[in-house]
Amino acid sequence: MLGCNQALIAPPFLPLVLERIFNPDRMSLEGPERRPPANYEGHTRWKERVAVTTLATATTFGQTDVQVSRLGIGVMTWGTPKGLARWTPATLAYGAADGAAAEQQAFAASLAAGVTLFDTAAMYSGGASEQRLGELARGTPAVIATKFPPGLFSRADSLPRELEASLRRLERACVELYQHHFPSSRTPIATVMELMADAVEAGKVRAVGVSNYSAAQMREAHAVLARRGIPLASNQVEYSLLHRQPETNGVLDACRELGVSLIAYQPLASGALTGKYGAHARPSGLRRLLPAFRGRGQEAAQPVVALLREIGAAHGKSPAQVALRWLLEQPQVIPIPGAKNAAQAQANAEALSFSLSPAEVEALGTATAAWRA
Ligand SMILES: NC(=O)c1ccc[n+]([C@@H]2O[C@H](COP(=O)([O-])OP(=O)(O)OC[C@H]3O[C@@H](n4cnc5c(N)ncnc54)[C@H](OP(=O)(O)O)[C@@H]3O)[C@@H](O)[C@H]2O)c1
């Protein structure tokens, strides 16, 4: 099946390119068994895709047929916000962006390296991130994941209108993954999932995801969608070596059990796992106030970074690449590191090209056991 944008504007050779990129034979769904719900008609297809190689570079969003690279890129800081949007959390947290040319080069470097998933949200910089991604993605095989709602006070019944606004900014007739950004009393899960299902049936959304959902909230969303014959594709949550709560709060187990992809945001712990920050070098933006960048939190992270460096040296890889690879060793996890320029995007994509030994995975797990709490 073609992606959303291809239906609109792709040149005729793109399906062939896509087939090469997403050869299902290269997919890996190894590891803990992921059972599809009996009522989902993709059950047979799911079983056919099982386990081929650990160096898989492609997968699907959960049990949907939407094919996607095993690692994506988060474009939260991209775009040129105007007015009050200049003071939204992404801009404040990460400081100044590297500029439009750097974004264009990062976009091109990602696609060239086989990274096709681009994650954005209506909320990022008041829609400027979606708009920039829409410009860059014209005529490309980019798989776009975006999120509803656009603001903290939005109500569930605004979803159809806000989806149209996102599609306009993204310059698309449909989006591959539409995610509920965070649960809130103004956007009840059942209402949002019914509206998401309507959008799938209308052909405006190919897969439905959630974000910042607990295991119980995932089960609720999964059940509502299952009644409409639609699988819950993904739950996007914070997950890195310095934030391992998904392993202990039931989210990772629920993803495995329900056959849902876990999209890992802040997989580099906002840059703390890259090894470039320490007492000698503070990051830009308000993220410097995060525990990993100051005081005891920063001290505690240093042995983790040292281990990443040591393991990386054996593979010719950087601490950031090893940190991403640790996530990729779990087949249901899709990390989406943010990147400000082509060098970062290219480096992050290289996490797809090597693997860690079980002993290395275990050593990193042991060194970061405290971050499971
Ligand atoms: N669903 C949600 O609620 C939610 C929340 C937050 C984020 N997200 C998504 O997750 C994505 C990623 O999260 P994030 O950007 O906050 O955190 P992150 O991926 O952990 O960190 C990204 C930052 O690390 C640095 N970096 C990236 N690659 C690097 C490399 N190879 N070498 C050295 N430094 C590198 C860059 O900043 P510097 O160069 O300035 O250090 C970059 O901005 C976002 O873009 C967004 O799509 C979702």
Image (cartoon, rainbow, N blue to C red):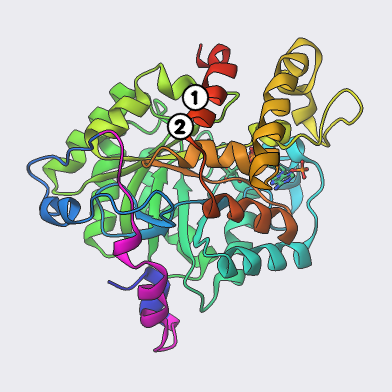
Instruction: Please tell me which residue lies in front, 319 or 60.
Output: 319
Drawn side of residue 346 relative to residue 41, left or right: right
The residue located at (23%, 55%) in the rendering is 49
- Mark 1 — residue? 362
Drawn side of residue 91 relative to residue 326, left or right: right
Q: Position of residue 342 (x, y in %)?
A: 72, 61
Q: Could you tell me which secondary element the residue under label 2 belongs to? A: helix
Q: Residues within 10 Å of mark 2 (few under 14, many from 20)?
A: few
Instruction: Relative to 98, say whether 152 is above or below.
Output: above
Q: CA distance from mark 1 to mark 2?
A: 6 Å
- Residue 358, numbered circle: 2
Q: Position of residue 36 (x, y in %)?
A: 16, 41
User: Mark 2 is on which residue type?
Assistant: Pro
| Residue 22 is a magenta residue | yes
- Start and end of the magenta stretch? 9-32
Q: Position of residue 122 (x, y in %)?
A: 53, 50
